[in-house]
Amino acid sequence: MSSALEYDETVECEAQKGPEREDLGSDDAPAANDSFKRTGRLTLYVRRFMRRKSAVVGLVMLVVLIFFAIFGSKLSKWSYDEPDFTALGSGPTADHWFGTTVGGSDLYAMVVRGLGRSLSIGLLSSIGTTVIAAIVGTAVAYFGGWFEKVGMWVLDMLLVVPSFLLIALIVSSATGGSDWLWLVFGLTAFGWIGYARTLRTLTLSLREREYVHAAKYMGVSSFHIIVRHLVPNLGSVLIINTVLGVIGAVNSETALSFLGLGIKAPDTSLGTLLNAGQTVVMTSPWILLFPSIVLIVLTFSVQLIGDGLRDAIDPYSRSAGKAE
């Protein structure tokens, strides 16, 4: 991957130089080298990402959803926990843009609140899962020997744990509006296991690199080698899986809340709204329709961004084009 990146960087630099370089004689070589500009990796990643139109569309959609979750409540006079008893189960109107629930709650305000809550759970859980999986997975591969055998045995044992039921038990016992924090804790505590196995496999080749051996001979601590040398070299994989992990966390939260095992009233999430909407889908379809649309747009946008990041970071991908 590094050689391919260097090639793209060279091509990028040649393009920036233009045809003027051909007119330079041998005496002007030092001056040409002084003005030689090197394009950084981050710049290349951004350019490759922006070349993929679907990824840009996904990014725009996600930004719109984030602004909707943050500032959407300021556009309506109703709060998610403020029912309107004069409009029980009414359809979309000028006063209630998305209609109301059977209890009179403004569905627009509840969707804004639910989207923000689902996004918070997805982002925090995905970041926490990535951090734990990166440290554990690289440590298991780095130390090797009996430590690796014990570590893999522990990971295999944790994979058979019924995590869905345990998370439901953890969240169901939460009180005082802290259920979403316990849900983040549960999703993070059980979501890193399979990911750590994958990172362990990728680290097996990294631990034999020259810079790792050089750091060992220089007396660098194992923890510093893992955090400073191994984890950053898995950065592309970590970034992609962190973004895609948001989808998994949001879907898990939605499934738990849909079954009544996640977020509880008076708080709300997209899963809670879907649970409420499926019981009255024949009489009040808008209660199910609008949260479903928001959830589909959210997952679709994150998926497009993940595909774009994968093609931008992968130097052998042809879908993002060549540096020009």
Image (cartoon, rainbow, N blue to C red):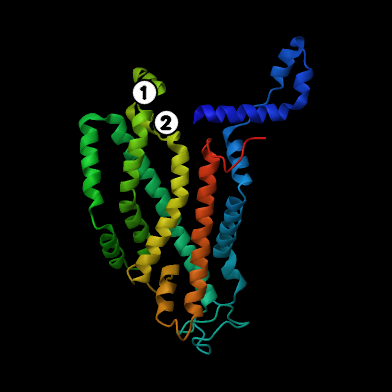
Residue 23 position within the rendered picture, expressed as x and y whole percent measured from the top left: 79, 18
Q: Residue at x 49, y 81 (%)?
A: 285
Q: Residues within 10 Å of mark 2 (few under 14, many from 20)?
A: few
Relative placement, left or right, of 294 versus 9 is left
Element assignment for label 2: helix
Amino acid beneath label 1: Val
Residue 297 position within the rendered picture, expressed as x and y whole percent measured from the top left: 53, 63
- Name the residue carrying label 2: 228
Q: Residues within 10 Å of mark 1 (few under 14, many from 20)?
A: few
Amino acid beneath label 2: Arg
Residue 21 position within the rendered picture, expressed as x and y whole percent measured from the top left: 75, 21
Extreme residue in the top direction: 27
For the residues bearing labels 2 and 1, Cβ distance under 8 angstroms: yes
Relative placement, left or right, of 216 versus 302 is left
Q: Residue at x 67, y 35 (%)?
A: 324
Residue nearest the viewer, comparing 320 with 113: 320
Q: Residue at x 27, y 57 (%)?
A: 163
Q: Is residue 222 above or below residue 42?
A: above
Residue nearest the viewer, comparing 172 with 320: 320
Relative placement, left or right, of 75 versus 262 is right
- Name the residue carrying label 1: 220
- Residue 263 can be seen in this image: no
Q: Residue at x 33, y 39 (%)?
A: 137
Q: Is residue 153 above or below residue 74?
A: above
Residue 97 position within the rendered picture, expressed as x and y whole percent measured from the top left: 59, 78
Q: How much space separates mark 2 and mark 1, taking CA atoms?
A: 10 Å
Q: How many marks?
A: 2
